[in-house]
Image: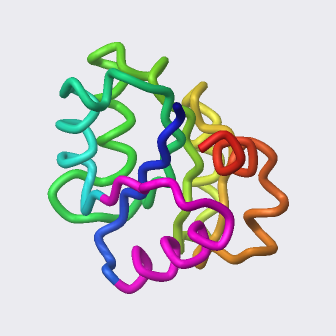
Amino acid sequence: MNKIVLVDDDPIIQFVNLRILRKYTSQGVVQLENGAEALAYFQGAEGAAVSHLVLLDINMPVMDGWEFLDAVYQHGLEGRMSVIVLTSSVDILDMEKSKNYGNIIHFVQKPLTADKVDKIPMLMEYLEQA
């Protein structure tokens, strides 16, 4: 079984993303508020059990998305997840930086919409396999 993990500090964005995803699947979605929570999840038993698709915000308190990804690689956890960066950032440097991480498969501007979901094949695959 595959799991989808939403990592975003904004509760409104979490709510919107969850509503969009629930239109496609009844699968439970793991919701985490920052990179530190996400890292703890992936270091735990539940995070090791299945393949994950992570929808990751970049700008968050405690541990941002880049710090999370750096820690994932330091701990050898990158094979457990594919990542879609879902951010409000319009900085071209963020888009360029995302190319440094082999497990980032897509870079998407917030908010998530049904149209955007339809255009991301791996996201659709995870939703259908759930």
> With respect to residue 59, does 120 lie above or below?
above
7 part of magenta stretch: no
Please tell me whether residue 28 belongs to the stretch shown in magenta.
yes
**Residue shown at the point (78%, 53%) measured from the top left:** 120
Q: Quadrant of the C terminus?
A: top right
Residue 106 percent across, percent down from the top left: 69, 47
Residue 68's place in the image compared with 74, above or below, is below
Question: Closest to the observer: 11 or 90?
Answer: 11
- Residue 81 picture location, percent across and down: 49, 30
Q: In this view, does 61 lie above or below 99?
A: below
State whether residue 63 is above or below residue 21: above
Q: In this view, does 79 lie to the left or right of 110?
A: left
Q: What stretch is highlighted in magenta?
A: 12-31
Residue displayed at 56% across by 34% down: 82
Closer-to-camera residue (92/107): 107
Most distant residue in the top direction: 76
Q: Position of residue 85 (x, y in %)?
A: 55, 53
Image location of residue 46, percent across then percent down: 26, 31
Q: Residue at x 73, y 63 (%)?
A: 117
Q: Which residue sits at x=25%, y=62%?
A: 33
Left or right? Give the position of 9 relative to 17. Answer: left
